[in-house]
Amino acid sequence: DADGNVWADGAEMPSGDLALYAKYDRVSVHLAVVDGTTGVIEKAHRTDTEQWYVYGFTGRRINKSEFDKMFVGVGDATVTVDNSELSSFKSFGTGSKVHVIDNVTGEEVETFYVIVFGDLDGNALINVNDATKLNKELKQATWSSRRGGVPYLIKAADLKTDRLINVNDATLLNQVANSLKKINQQTGTVPND
């Protein structure tokens, strides 16, 4: 048959008790996007780091309940999310860390950073504080430099999606902060409407 089992001529089934044991392959433990949602899982484009991102959130505040509607642990997994180190708010925003733990081994098998495009202070809100932070960054280049940069902040600030942080991104973020435009959180772009 398709499983490689063959029937040998003259073979007989034993008349006594026969124990059969199922063989199961272990499902790999990982994070997945829930079908029908706007969730995205993406690997960083940089070659000097192994960072993964999750994004696509549509609400103003992201909590564990909102996260669980979009992402799910596959296999024998536990998924936890830390609040962003950038913010004192008790919600998730840019920089929040997602941990995928294998319940069998106890190992952390995957780590992701939450991205909310335009959110540079980690509170998941996009406002003048984020625009101010980006304008300051353009002058000082503390987290956006190619060496020693903070990849998840660069990803959140790159609204032109050209892998550069510059005045074009600042202009778009100022327009979003002033409610003149909106960011598509699934693509990280600002439509021209």
Image (cartoon, rainbow, N blue to C red):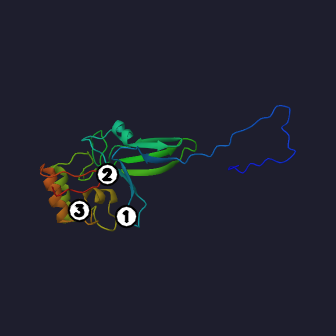
Mark nearer the N terminus (3 vs 1): 1
Query: Three-letter amino acid code at disc 1?
Result: His
Mark nearer the N terminus (1 vs 2): 1
Q: Position of residue 172 (x, y in %)?
A: 17, 58
Residue in view at x 33 percent, y 56 percent: 152
Badge 2 marks a residue whose secondary structure is loop
- The single residue placed furthest to the front in the displayed view is 9
Within 10 Å of the Cα at label 2, are there few (<14), some (14-19), or many (20+) other Cα atoms? many
Q: Is residue 171 left or right of residue 142?
A: left
Residue contact at pointers 1 and 2, CB within 8 angstroms:
no
Residue bearing mark 1 = 45
Residue in view at x 77 percent, y 35 percent: 19
Q: Nearer the viewer, mark 3 or mark 2?
A: 3
Q: Is residue 72 left or right of residue 162?
A: right
Whether residue 135 is visible to the viewer of this picture, yes or no, is no
Badge 1 marks a residue whose secondary structure is loop
Residue bearing mark 3 = 160
Query: Three-letter amino acid code at disc 3?
Result: Lys
Whether residue 54 is visible to the viewer of this picture, yes or no, is yes
Q: Nearer the viewer, residue 5 or 19?
A: 5
Residue bearing mark 2 = 115
Image quarter (top left, top right, bottom left or bottom right) of the C terminus: bottom left
Q: Nearer the viewer, residue 107 or 9?
A: 9
